[in-house]
Image (tube, rainbow, N blue to C red):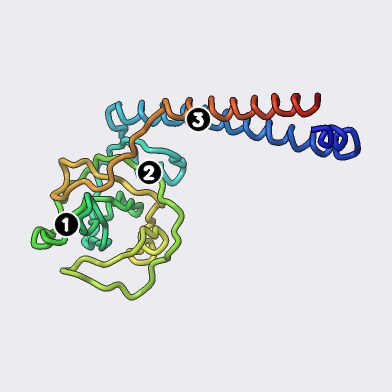
Amino acid sequence: MARVKKLLNHHHFDLFTLCVCFVVCFFIYLGFWQLQRADEKKSILLSLSEAPKSISIKSLSQKKVSQYQKILLSDGYWLSHEYLKQNVIKDNQLGMQVYGIFCQKNDCLIVNQGWLPNDQKSKLKKNIKKNYLIGVIRPLPYILIDEKYPLNFLDNFGLIVSLDAKFFSKLTNKNVLPYEVVVDQSLTYYQTLTTLPGISVARHYGYAIQFYLLALVVVIGYIYIKK
């Protein structure tokens, strides 16, 4: 301990103090970040508990959606082709995810219609084609694997590996926006695979407290060493 104190009394003291200040500020920042995450999830929960908001796809191209929102799209149409993502696991069972594309005029969205186990492949068929859509919209994640031509087909369903909005735009000659709509279960034949994440607000408050306590521990340790 005496050696540490001697070290701190020299030029290393300023560097050590600077490092301690940085670590404390970083933990405090993480605490505030967790509080911000809690507020975001509160707004998501509020949005999902309300009636679907009637919007147009065109408005989505002008207004960025950054979180889950329940929406209603009216007076639209489905493109004839649908798509499959194979080898998707649900409840330890292998199956396929079914996607369609819903449009209003020239603007379209990728629609997650549900999941079908491989042993029920015979049930794979074109979905209900209503001129409206109810579901929860969310931004597409970053694409690691771009789709490429040509597409393989299974029972007239195009086989895909990712939700590549730019690829679908080229494929359909439509303006496919970078969003996915998880369709309301009443509008589909298939099982819902993509459940909305268990949104826990309380855990973010717990994380925030942990980061604040870590900052306090660092401060106390610094004071102890300084003595």
Q: Amino acid at mark 2?
A: Arg
Residue 31 in percent (x, y) is at 57, 29
Instruction: Identify the residue at horizontal 42%, vertical 65% (top origin).
Output: 146
Neighbour class for label 3 at 10 Å: few (<14), some, many (≥20)?
some
Instruction: Identify the residue at horizontal 26%, vertical 62% (top origin).
Output: 87
Residue 17 in percent (x, y) is at 79, 33
Q: Which residue is mark 3?
A: 207
Contact between labelled residues 2 and 1, with CB atoms less than 8 Å apart: no
Q: Amino acid at mark 3?
A: Tyr
Instruction: Say which element carries label 3.
Output: helix
Alpha carbon of mark 3 to alpha carbon of mark 2: how far? Answer: 25 Å
Q: Which residue is mark 1?
A: 117
Residue 42 in percent (x, y) is at 41, 26
Which of disc 2 and disc 3 is earlier in sequence?
2
Instruction: Identify the residue at horizontal 79%, vertical 37% (top origin).
Output: 16
Alpha carbon of mark 1 to alpha carbon of mark 2: how far? Answer: 24 Å
Q: Is residue 28 left or right of residue 190?
A: right
Instruction: Identify the residue at horizontal 62%, vertical 32% (top origin).
Output: 27
Please identify the residue farthest to the front as the structure is shown: 2
The answer to which of 58 and 50 lies nearer the viewer is 50
Neighbour class for label 1 at 10 Å: few (<14), some, many (≥20)?
many
